[in-house]
Amino acid sequence: MKNSNLFLLIIVICFLFIQCKTETQKSQTISAENTVKYAKGFSIENYDGFSIVTVKNPWPKATKTYTYILKEKNGIVPDSLSQNTIINVPIQKIVVTSTTHIPSLEMLDEENKLIGFPNLDYISSEKVRALIDHKKIKELGNNQSLNTEVILDLQPDVIIGYGIDNNNPTLDNLQKSGLKVMLNGDWNEETPLGKAEWIKFFGAIFGKQKKAEGLFTKIETDYLKTIEIAKRAASTPTVLAGDIFEGKWYLPKGTSWGSLLLKQANSNYLWQATTGTGSLSLSFETVFEKAKNADLWITSGQFSTLKEMTDANPHYAQFDAFKNKNVYSFTRKKGKTGGVLYYELAPNRPDIVLKDLVKILHPELLVGYEPFFFEKLK
């Protein structure tokens, strides 16, 4: 009887052990919820002591997925993930390579962690320019040929790079030298809120996910509210975009970031029926035939005055939007070394861009609001 009870006890213990082990295995294989809502190019999954950031589309038609493990202090990363790039967070020193990365650092109050950047003159942010003036940020040359010697001396915790294809030998060499590189594909997002949501990427590496979430939620709320305001408009103005560069007229394709903003501002962008996220390349004659009577014209940003436009091409004056002085540009707001603020900040703040467009297209809907980026050319 004693032996029988002992045997049963052993069976029960074994059963509980197996069940416990199974539950543990299950808990390790269950994926955490992705905290990214609009962006298609990355995801964030949070676990106890670490997060997994997956970058899926760092350049058009990319076929490779990049996985980064953000390890917190005293966090334990499972062996199954150890083959991926592991970065200790929160980071203290960072190198970024696109001006679109700068606003996220500034909004998170982490611009003082920036120690290097290629082509410093492109940066418009006043806070970051002050750091540059005080020699806190090093010049790193050109994005496709970064000064590896300077970067190795700086020893950043992470380098945030981007690529237009799968060919960036400078970043590859830096990784071989032991530095950590994360790819950022914010520029490849197709929707305004998708681009803006990359602030969560930076929130994760600085250990400020809650702050990043709050900042993005505010942008999202204001953006969606402005869309609803635009729906009240009594008219839908027709819009022409872009201008001629090296003999061709470049303007946004119909499913691009810029085209979607114009649509959500309740306008009739004349090429919104086209597909694609890049630019159309058309002849002057093709554009003039379709857009000569357009109500409003948003230029590419090459020109600061109407005279500059006609000096470049006198035929611009044949468009009704030009005759009626309804031509707008976003290039008048620049940093002190000539960087255009729109290129740096607009992808991060689509709520401001949309408000600007609604004010331009339907001034009666946003009484008292003054456009931040856009100005009417004189």
Image: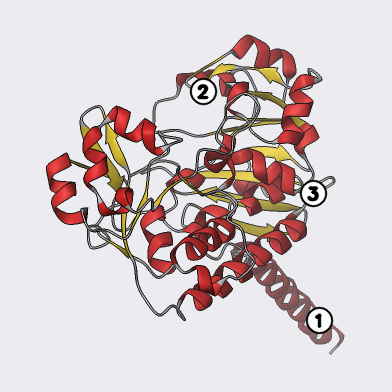
Say which of 143 and 135 sits in front: 135
Dot 3 or dot 1: first in sequence order is 1
Which residue is at the far right?
A: 2
Q: In this rendering, is residue 11 above or below 128? A: below
Residue pointed to by mark 3: 75
Whole-angstrom CA distance, mark 1 to mark 2, is: 67 Å
Q: Which quadrant, please, contains the N terminus?
A: bottom right
In x, y percent, where is residue 328? Answer: 43, 48
Confirm whether residue 83 shows in the render.
Answer: no
User: Seen in the image, is 211 located left or right of residue 286?
Assistant: right
Q: Is residue 335 above or below residue 267?
A: above
Residue of label 1: 9
Q: Earlier in the sequence, mark 1 or mark 2?
A: 1
Q: Residue at x 61, y 56 (%)?
A: 44
**Numbered mark located on residue 352 in the image:** none
Binning the other alpha carbons within 10 Å of mark 3 as few (below 14), some (14 to 19) or many (20 upward) gives: some
